[in-house]
Each structure stands twice: as structure tokens, then as C-alpha cells.
Image: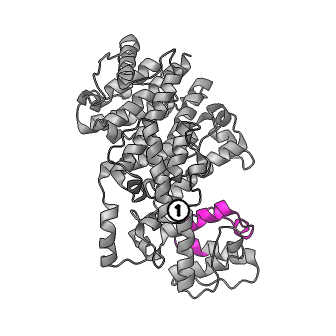
Amino acid sequence: MNPVDGLFRSVGDGILLCKLINAAVPETIDVRAVNIKKKAKELNIYEKTENHNLSINAAKSIGCSVVNIGPTDLIEGKPILVLGLVWQIIKIQLTSTINLKNHPELMRLLLDGETLEEFMKLPPDQILLRWVNYHLSAAGHPKKVNNFSSDLQDATAYSVLLHHIAPHDCDLCHETVPEERAAHVIRNARKLQVETFIKPRDITSGNPKLNMSFVAQLFNTCPALDLVEEELKQLEEILYDDVGDTREERVFRMWINSLAIDGVYINHLFSDMRDGINLLKVFEKIEKGIVSWQKVNLVAPNKFKQVENCNYCVVLGKQLKFSLVNIGGADIFEGAKKLILSIIWQSMRYQQLKLLSGLSKGQAEITDKDIIDWANAKVRQGGRIKSQIVAFRDLGLSDALYLLDLVHAVEPRAVNWDQVSQGKSDDDKASNAKYAISCAQKIGAAVFLTYEDIVEVKPKMMMTFVASLMSLDMHNNA
């Protein structure tokens, strides 16, 4: 790869980005949906565009912000946009497991008086800084690291950190020249099998992205934190919740992050809604002008002010005609999971139906029945299997054949039917469901559900999938 512009050329056909996304979050993209080169023949513009539709929508589904990034930008290799997207994917790869669920020993980093819920709200980069400082303090180092740039430039903190987490492998770095000390630090890291790509100059220049990546690699390789049995028991109630709720939480979190709301990036859905401000920003995004910001406590340092905001969320939710029976502001503040999931689901649904109503010609309000009628008509007109559904809970949807037929009806070239299984086993259903999601993303549909949602026929998630295809089709035919 040419070191000057090799990256920007290499992403042009979309294949590299699809591979990078799968390296970051395995099986995000079904590789059967990726257009690949045959006999060294270059992909045509249509095939490249499909690959980038797939990579952009898949990136969105794992939490990347892709606002103002389109297939043409990536085909042309626009440096700022390519670097921005690639960095987001790499960051997700390096930090996606830095949480209590994957590393319960992180409990050791809780501050005096801090609750588990408060700790879980921290973004991964803040957890990493706390991890570094925990070990620096334990090693008796007098300074604290508050950032990934100037506080790490002289490489001293790295030297102390590595020696403390792996004293038998990593000696202290006594070089007087910072760049030589940084080189020693990197050699020590490699003794721990850290496959780092950072260079001494990156450390001494205070490159925040590369330093954060390096710290994440060190943590992922050697966290050096112990956890006692009693502490692990405290975690069980939080860490082993209903799997379905966990999947929904992730889907809704990624959907909110895809909205690209200024100042909003959700790391933990329930705790990040606690002060009401993020939820109000979501409402404002889906219905511009609904929030009277003079009524909002933008600085909400205590429970009283935060509950006030949450009460206002309930008022606005009712204005949006959400079903909020027995839901109060205190429930949002306390992180009541089922209730918060319900509010976010209704927000997502509201946005999708509003988009469809805007695209429809003269129809004021779109209903579930309208979406089903559209899908059945589309499949009758251009499908291969031509089956029909009555509701989004139809168990026949579990094999994903109807969904694949619908994708085919919207764009006939999108589905390679040789890759589709006609079997009815769980593996056959899962294979088809994964392929259906990637095929939908490939033609430009923004879908956030998981393949399990299809196999288990989760009606809400089915509705979002079909509605996304309907929006795409109406937009293409507008």
C-alpha cells in the first residue's frame, strides 16, 4: 500500500471497509452480500456503490457516526471522510469490550461513593484513563494522566504503567531523551505480545488517537486487575439481565447514535437517559420544535432537577401520542429498563412513520397495515417466492425468505438466490436472516435489528426492517 495515498485508494471498492467492520465487530456484515472482484476484474461503479452502501449502513449499526458520508465520497477516497470513518471503526474494535460485562474486574476502578450504574455510564476512553491512573497510583507515581496527549508525551507514565502491570517482562525506562524512552516503552509492550502500530514520534508528539489506541491495546492484553468473589456477586444482577432486553438496548442505542445529535453519544442507554436531557434531544430530533428549552434544566446537578427534566419527557411523549401508561419521570431517572425501552421504541417508530408519511403522496398518516400492504404488493409485483404476511408477528417470517424476497422486489440485483437456504433448521434460518440484513443494507436501507430478532420474529424489529425498505423504495421512486 502506497504510504501517501494508499489507504484512500484501497477503500475505493468498499471491500476493505467491509472487512475492517467485520474485524471490529465480527459477523456485522454477511460476506455473501459483498461484491468481490472476479478474475482480477475491477468492480463497476454500481457494485462499488453497493459495497459502500453496505459498509456505511453496517458502520451505522455498530455505532459509527456517518453523517455527510456517502458512497461517492468513499469511492473517490476523500481523505478527511475516509480517515474519520476508519478511525471510528478502529476505536470500536479496540474499545467495544472495555466494560463491566466483558471485564468485571473493572469494578476495582470504582471511586469512593461511586455506584456501578454511574461507572457503567463512563465512555471507554474515560475508563482507560482511570485504569492508567489506578496503576500509576498503585506504583507510587506522583502524577495523574488526564488526557491522551500532553500527559503522555514524555512516555514516563507508560514506563511506570508497563513495569507495574508486568514487572517481570517490562523494565523501567531511564532514558533521558523522550523519544528514546518512548521507543523503549514500545519494545516493552511488544514483550507482552501487544501488536501495536504506534511509533515513538506518535507518543512524543501527543497524538491523542494513537495514544488512546495504544492504551486500549495494553488494557486488552494485560488489564492486571483482580476481583474477589464477593464483588463478582454484586455484579450479577446488572450483568446478567434478560438477553432480549440487552439486544433491544443495543439496537436503540445504535439508532440514537445514528441520528447524529449534537452532544449526544449513548454508551449505556438506561443511565444515559437519567437526567432527561438526552431523551429531550431525541424528541427534538424526531419532532423539531417540540422542546421548549427554557423549561429544561440543562445543568441538572441533583435528583430534583433531573426528575423535573424526566417529567417533561413524559409530558412531551404524551404530546407525541406515545403510550405512557403508568410511566412517570421518576421511572426514567431510576433507569426502569422496560419503560425506557418502550419510550425509545416509540420514538424510533415515530421517526420512521413520519418519514414514510413525508414520502407518501397525500397520505397523512402511515400505519402498520399500510406497511404490510405495501410489502405484500411489492412482493406480488416483483418477488420470486411471492408469499404474503398478515402481521409482523407471522411465524413464517422466521426463515427470512419473505424479507429476502422483499429486498429482491425493491432491487432485483441485490440477492444472490444461490446463497439462500430453503431449509427450516435453526442454522438455515440464522444464515438467511444474516444475509437479509446485509442485502438490505447493501441497497441503502438503514436497519438496526439483529439476525436473532428475525429468527425469533420480534414484531417491533420486523416492522423497522420492512419500514426501512419501504422508505428506501419510496425515496427511489419519488
The one nearer the camera, 199 or 403, is: 403
Name of the residue lying farthest toward the bottom: 140
Q: Say whether residue 448 is visible.
A: no
Based on the displayed image, in which of its 4 quarters is residue 66 positioned? top right
Q: Is residue 189 magenta?
A: yes
Q: Position of residue 228 (x, y in %)?
A: 34, 79
The range drawn in magenta is 188-217
- Secondary structure type for disc 1: helix
Residue on which disc 1 sits:
124
The one nearer the camera, 414 or 453, is: 453
Q: Position of residue 151 (x, y in %)?
A: 69, 74
Could you tell whether 368 is left or right of 16 in the image?
left
Could you tell whether 182 is left or right of 137 in the image?
right
Amino acid on which the number 1 mark rests in the picture: Pro
Q: Position of residue 84 (x, y in %)?
A: 65, 48
Q: Residue at x 23, y 31 (%)?
A: 424
Main secondary-structure element of the magenta-colored stretch: helix
Q: Residue at x 59, y 62 (%)?
A: 213
Quick one: label 1, few (<14), some, or many (20+) residues within 10 Å? many
